Amino acid sequence: MSSETTAGQRNWVWSVPYVAIGIFAVAMLALVWGLQKRETDLQNDALGRDVQWAEQTMRLHMQGTQDTLSQMAREMAEGKLDRGAFQVRATQYLANTPELANIVWVDSGQIIRWTAPFETTEWIAGERLAGAQPLSFAQALTSGRPTYGEAYVNHRGAALLEVYVPVQYGRTYLGTLVGVYTIEGMVRHLVPNWFDEKYSLSIVDAAGQVLASNTTVRPADDALSYAIDFDPPGNGLALRAKAFRTDPGVARVVPLFLVVGLTLVVVLSLWALRSHFQRRVRVEKERDRLFNLSLDMLCIAGMDGSFRRVNPAFGRVLGYSAEDITGRPLLDYVHPEDLAATVDVLRQLAAGQPASFEGRWRAADGRYRWLLWAINPVPEEKLLYAVAHDITDRREDEEKLKSAYAFRRAMGESLVTGIRAIDLEGRIIFVNPAFCRMIGWSEQELLGMRPPFPYWPPEEAEQRRRDLDLTLAGQAPPGGIEMRVMHRDGHRFDVRMYLSPLIDSSGRQVGWMASMNDITERKRMEEETLRHQERLEQTSRLITMGEMASSLAHELNQPLSAIANYCMGSVNRLKSGDYRREDILAAMEKASAQAERAGKIIRRTREFVKKSEPVRGPAALVEIVEEAIGFAEIEARKAAVAIQVSIPPDLPPVFADRIMIEQVVLNLVKNGIESMQQTPPEARTLNLAARFDGEGGAAACFGLHCRWERSHDGTVRLHRR
C-alpha cells in the first residue's frame, strides 16, 4: 500500500468524527429553532385574539358615545335641550368619558354655537368649521347618520378624531353635534390595564404613521406584532399591537449558544487531540531521524551496561555495526587503564546519578579512540541514555597546544626583556618573569591591576598617565618611550618601552604589548662619554689658547703699553703745571679705550676657554667671524697670511651655540694658516666668505660648506654638511 493511500485513509478516519459532530450540531440547531418557532406562533395567535378583543371593546365604547350624542341630538331637535342643559349634560358626560375632549353644537350654517367644556380654546362659539371639517359635516347631513371624519393633528401636536351626529327635526337638518376624541385617550382608556402590561397598542393612519400609543416603551422584538382595521371610524385607521417579551432575549439565544459552543468545544478538543497525536508522531520521527543521522554516538543501554540500541555513528567512529555491538557489555571495549574508572561511573549511574567522563575505547581496527561520554539514567525504565563524542583529534590538539604553551612559556621566562600586556582599558593581563624581576612585584600581584601602577614614581605619575593615554589611543611613538620606573624597594632606574598592538586569533585588537629594556647602564655610559667629550673640548680650547698665548700676550701688551704711556704723559703734564684740561681729558679717554680693548680681549679669552653647557640662540655670523679672526690675526701676521672677509652685513642670524661655532671657525682659520707654510708669501691669502641663497639655501665659508634653514621666527639654523 502506497504512502498516499495510507495518508488518505488516515485523513478519512479523522474526518468521520467531524462529520458526525457537524450532523449532531445541525440537528440540535434545527430542534431548537423548531421549538422557538412553535412558541412564536402560539404567541402570535394569542396576540391576534387579544387585539380583536381590544378592537371590539373600543368599538363598543365609541358606539355608546355615539348613542349618547344621538340622544342629545333628538332632544335638541325637539327643543328639550337648551344651552344651559347642554352645558351641564355635556360636561358631565365628558367627565365620565376621558377619551372625549369636546362636545360641540354646529348649526346648519357650519357655525359653532355651543361648546363643552365652555372654556375650551379649540372650538370657539361663532367661528366656522375649517379644513376637512365641512366635508365631514356635509356627509353627516347627507347620510342622515353619524359620520367619522379623518384623523388629524392639531397645532398642539395632539391627534384628534371627530364624530358628526346630525340634528334633524322632521326633514329639516338643524346642524350636527360633534364629539371630539383624543386618539391617545382612546388607546389609553378604552382598553383594560392588563392589555397595557402585555402589549404596545397604537393607532396608525393609512400611511402607517403612528398617531398615538399606549406606551412610550419600544418592544424588544417586532416579530410578535398584529394589526387590524379600525372600522368604525374607518378612513384607513388601524389598530396595531406589539407584544412585550416576558422572557429575556438571552433565554432564547442561550440554547443556540450552548449547542454551538459545545460543538466548538468538541471540535477543538478533537482537533487538539489530532494535533497532539500528529505532533507525537512527528516528534518520534524526528527523534528517530536525529538518532540515526546524528554525528555523535547515541545509544541506549541497560543498567548492567549492555547495549540495547546504537545509532549508525558507532560504525562510523569505531567501525562496529549495530548487530556486532547490540547485547554486548560496554566494558568489553574500554581500555584496560580506564576500566576501573568506568566501573565507578557505572556504580554512580546505578545509584540514579548522571555522569560525564572521558575514556579510551577500542575500535574495530584495534586502535583506541578517546570518547567523551554523557550518560543519564532512567531508574523506572532501568535504562541508560548516553551520547558519546569522538575527541581523539581534540586530545591530540590539546597535547600539541600544551607542548607549544610550555615552549612559549619557557621562552618567555628565559627572556631578559620585560614583557607586559594590557587590555584596551589599561588593565594588566600578562607579565613575564623578567618584568617582575625588574620592578620587584610578583605576577599574581600585577595581573588585573589598573593604573596608576605601583612601579610609577609618584613624582612622575602624571607624565606616566599621559604616556598610557597616548598608548591606549594608538599614538605611542614608534621609537618607544623612555621613562623612569620605580622598583618595589624604592630605587629608580631608566627603561625604554616599545609598544605594539596585541592581536587575538580572530585578527581583532584586544590590547597593547610592551617590551621594557633597562637602559640605566647605557645612559650612564652615554653621560660619561659626554663628560669626556666636554673635557676634551675644554682641553682643546686650552691647547688652542696655549698655542696662542704669545699672540695674546702681544695683543694685550699693546693696549697696556698705550695705557701706561697715556697715564705717564698726563702725570708729567700735571706735575709741570703746563697743561690744558682738554688735552688731559683726551689722553684719559684714549687710555680708557685701550683699557676697554684689553678687557674685551680677556673676556673673550675667558668665554672661549671656560667650561659651560651649549647655549643655542640667534647669533650674527659676521660677529662670530670677527671674534675668531681677532684670536688668529696675530698668528696670521707672523705667517704673512692676509685674511679677507666677504660676509654680507644683512645675512640672517644663525641658530647655534656662539662659542662652539667660534671655536670651529678659529680651528679652520688656524688650519688654513698652517696649510700655507709652503705657499709663497705673496700668495698667502685666506678668504672667508658666506652667502645666503634664499629659503634652505647653501653657504660656503672658508672651505666649510653649510646648509641654512629659516625657522618660523625668522632665525636661520646652521647645519654642517
Image (spheres, helix red, strand yellow):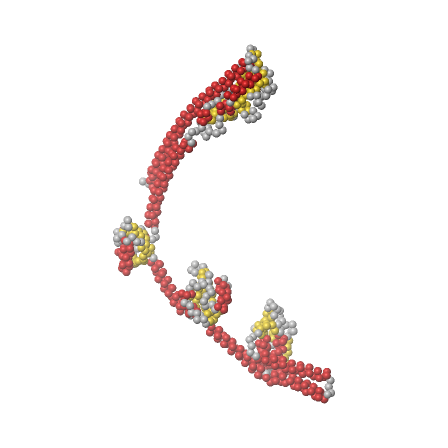
**Residue 153 location, quadrant:** top right
* Horizontal relation, residue 197 to residue 158: left or right: left
- Please, is residue 36 above or below residue 146 in the view? below
Residue at 35 percent across and 62 percent down: it is: 399
- Please, is residue 645 above or below residue 413 in the view? below
Which quadrant, please, contains the N terminus?
A: top left
- The spot of residue 663 in percent (x, y) is 58, 78
Q: Nearer the viewer, residue 452 or 556?
A: 452
Q: Nearer the viewer, residue 111 or 384?
A: 111
- Observer able to see residue 396: yes
* Horizontal relation, residue 433 to residue 611: left or right: left
Residue at 45 percent across and 67 percent down: it is: 454
- The spot of residue 299 in percent (x, y) is 30, 51
> For the image shown, how many numbered marks are present on the structure?
0
- Please, is residue 194 above or below residue 687 in the view? above
- The spot of residue 75 in percent (x, y) is 54, 14
Q: Nearer the viewer, residue 717 or 324?
A: 717
Which quadrant, please, contains the C terminus?
A: bottom right
Q: Residue furthest top?
A: 170
- The spot of residue 389 in percent (x, y) is 33, 55
- Observer able to see residue 178: no
Q: Residue furthest bottom?
A: 576
Residue at 55 percent across and 26 percent down: it is: 157
